[in-house]
Image: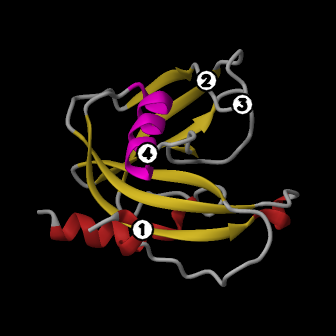
Amino acid sequence: MPESRRMKNTSPQHSGPAPIEKVVAYVTRGDRLLVFRHVDVDAGIQVPAGTLEPGESPSEGVLREAREETGIHSLQIVRFLGARDYDMSDHGNDEIHRRYHYHLKCVEDTPEVWRHFESDPTGRPQERIEFELYWVQLPDEVPDLAAPQGDFLPELLESLLSSD
């Protein structure tokens, strides 16, 4: 089924400019979730996420963003979890973000903790952003995720149960 037909959108309709399309990746290995923190900036604990490029589908974008932010190349999409619109005015941005949430599986061995530089951050290609990535146990060790990235954790847990 096309992603747009399976989209779970619990936000009210809005008028104004088109939403900025984003992707959020819940990367798992077994029953653990990959999270990270920015080394140089306090931006909270996050999961891989980012903005779709022109002409890019959400499924293409989530794999690209997750690879760029983690350095892991053997990622597989398990399933599309849903989408939701977010009004970013509470965060000082007069924007609406449409976020497509995915469950991805890591199929290679990784360290428990590692650092990686995202070398092509959207809008700032000259900048390199350093992340410290690490695995947390689901669901008990998952910290509060920044920028409501944790909104689809219940769907992720359901996905893990149904993919066993």
Please identify, in this view, whether the residue under mark 4 or under mark 1 is nearer the observer: 1
The x, y position of residue 71, in whole percent, is: 41, 25
Dot 2 corresponds to which residue? 130
Q: Identify the secondary structure beneath mark 2.
A: strand
Q: Which residues are magenta?
A: 57-71
Residue 4 - label:
1
Q: Where is the C terminus found, in terms of image quarters?
A: bottom left
Marked residue nearer the N-terminal end (1 or 2): 1
Q: Amino acid at mark 3?
A: Gly
Majority secondary structure in the magenta region: helix
Instruction: Look at the image and tell me whether residue 139 can be seen.
Output: no
Query: Is residue 123 rendered to the left or right of residue 32?
Result: right
Query: Is residue 114 rendered to the left or right of residue 95?
Result: left
Distance from disc 4 to disc 2, alpha carbons, whole Å, reads 19 Å
Check if mark 3's residue and mark 4's residue have beta carbons within 8 Å. no
Check if mark 3's residue and mark 2's residue have beta carbons within 8 Å. no
Marked residue nearer the N-terminal end (4 or 2): 4
Above or below for 49 versus 112: below
Dot 4 corresponds to which residue? 62
Q: Where is the N terminus found, in terms of image quarters?
A: bottom left
Identify the residue at horizontal 25%, vertical 55% (top origin).
31
Above or below for 158 versus 132: below
Q: Identify the secondary structure beneath mark 1.
A: helix
Pick whichever, 115 or 148, lies toward us.
148
Distance from disc 1 to disc 2, alpha carbons, whole Å, reads 33 Å
